Image: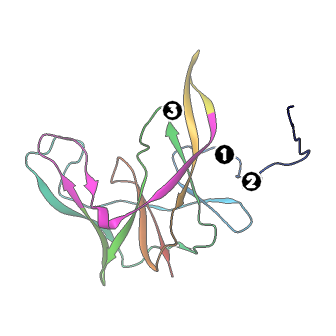
């Protein structure tokens, strides 16, 4: 004897995510009414070229002018929305806590001899949950298409008050905000 149970209309609701914006170069956050606003970008200042292989192992700081970010966010349903090239694993975006002083904010990074790029220190890194919301087909020329993933990033824990940044491959475009 086989027993079969069917429950009609039972589904697990998912959070409604906002539609992807048109500008793929920005980092967005969701407002309380689920609208997307772009985080402002600031340029990181460092004496190192992170796009060239490092000549030696080095620990340095990336500095941002000003003691506070202009955007203030709350922890309630804190979500960020980004675009990432298809098959980029892991995605380059990281959420980091910045050190604040009277006139600037900064992030300690390490460079490894012979390698391009940089890495923030684990104590400054905030763990993120990542979810691909949509795979977009984007025209990149005549009969050429790229695929881009529209993603949601969420901190796995509530953020304590302080200065934060979402960083990627480049230190020229650092998206900043603060939690009060």
At which x and y percent is residue 157?
50, 68
Dot in front, 1 or 3: 3
Numbered-mark total: 3
Q: Is residue 18 magenta?
A: no
Residue at screen point 29% across, 70% down? 106
The residue carrying mark 2 is: 16
Label 1: few (<14), some (14–19) or many (≥20) C-alpha neighbours in 10 Å:
some
Residue at screen point 77% across, 53% down? 13
Task: Please indicate whether residue 77 sits to the left or right of residue 166 in the image.
Answer: right
Residue at screen point 70% across, 52% down? 17
Q: Nearer the viewer, residue 29 or 173?
A: 29
Q: Is residue 129 magenta?
A: yes
Q: Secondary structure at mark 3?
A: loop
At which x and y percent is residue 65?
33, 71
At which x and y percent is residue 73?
56, 73
Q: Secondary structure at mark 1?
A: loop
- Label pair 1/2, CB-CB below 8 angstroms: no
The residue carrying mark 3 is: 86
* Inter-mark Cα distance, 2 to 3: 22 Å
Outermost bottom residue: 102
């Amino acid at each position: 004897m086989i027993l079969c149970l069917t429950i009609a209309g039972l589904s697990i609701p998912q959070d409604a995510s906002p539609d992807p914006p048109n500008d793929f170069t920005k980092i967005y956050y969701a407002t309380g009414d689920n609208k997307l606003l772009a985080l402002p970008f600031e340029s990181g200042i460092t004496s190192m070229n992170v796009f060239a292989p490092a000549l030696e192992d080095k620990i340095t700081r990336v500095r941002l002018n000003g003691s506070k970010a202009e955007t203030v966010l709350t922890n309630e349903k804190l979500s960020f929305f980004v675009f990432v090239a298809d098959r980029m694993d892991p995605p380059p975006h990281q959420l980091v806590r910045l050190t604040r002083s009277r006139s600037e904010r900064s992030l300690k990074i390490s460079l490894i001899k012979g390698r391009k790029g940089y890495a923030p220190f684990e104590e400054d890194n905030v763990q993120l949950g990542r979810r691909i919301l949509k795979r977009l087909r984007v025209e990149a020329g005549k009969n050429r298409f790229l695929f881009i993933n529209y993603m949601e990033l969420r901190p796995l824990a509530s953020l304590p008050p302080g200065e934060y940044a979402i960083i990627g491959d480049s230190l020229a475009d650092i998206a900043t905000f603060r939690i009060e």
